[in-house]
Amino acid sequence: MSSLPPLKVYYDGICPGCRRDRARYERWAGEAGRQVAWCDVTEHQATLREKGIAPQAALLSLHVEESDGRIQEGIDAYILLMRRVPRLKPLAWLVGLPGIKPALRWCYDRWVRQRLAREGRMP
């Protein structure tokens, strides 16, 4: 059994790419993946509101809740997840670098907004 603390990932379960990313993560994470609960934003809106997160904000950016209740979002949420997977740890380090992290955040935010607009779901 993994000694990693559990995480809750609030993700866009309607998005086919997001579902593929989840499946890939679960394959690569192995035992560590069992400590991650995947929560579809559309099904957990009340929970998100209780935590002070607007469901629209959760659609625009990945949110991960740590076992102590802290919430990481966006690139920081991805880094938290990647650090749990041995093959992704170097990528987590790279993504977290000061010059790279803001650029990736900008690209990610733009991509998500375009995807949601294309799907007619832009909040």
Image: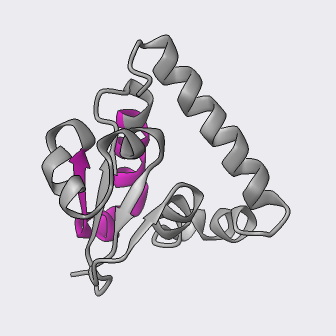
In the image, 84: left or right of 42?
right
Toward the viewer: 51 or 1? 51
x 37%, y 46%: residue:
58
In the image, 70: left or right of 67?
right
Q: How is the image coloured?
A: one colour
Does the stretch in magenta take in 23?
A: yes
Q: Quadrant of the C terminus?
A: top left
Give the overall secondary structure of the magenta segment. Answer: helix
Q: Position of residue 105 (x, y in %)?
A: 67, 50
Toward the viewer: 116 or 94? 116
Q: Quadrant of the N terminus?
A: bottom left
x 34%, y 63%: residue:
30
Outermost residue on the right side: it is 99
Q: Position of residue 92 (x, y in %)?
A: 63, 66
Count of numbered marks: 0
Does the stretch in magenta take in 38?
A: yes
Q: Position of residue 87 (x, y in %)?
A: 57, 64
16 versus 92 height, above or below: above
Q: Position of residue 115 (x, y in %)?
A: 52, 22
In the image, 68: left or right of 112?
left
x 25%, y 70%: residue:
35
Give residue 14's quadrant in the image.
top left
In the image, which residues are magenta? 19-40
x 31%, y 63%: residue:
33
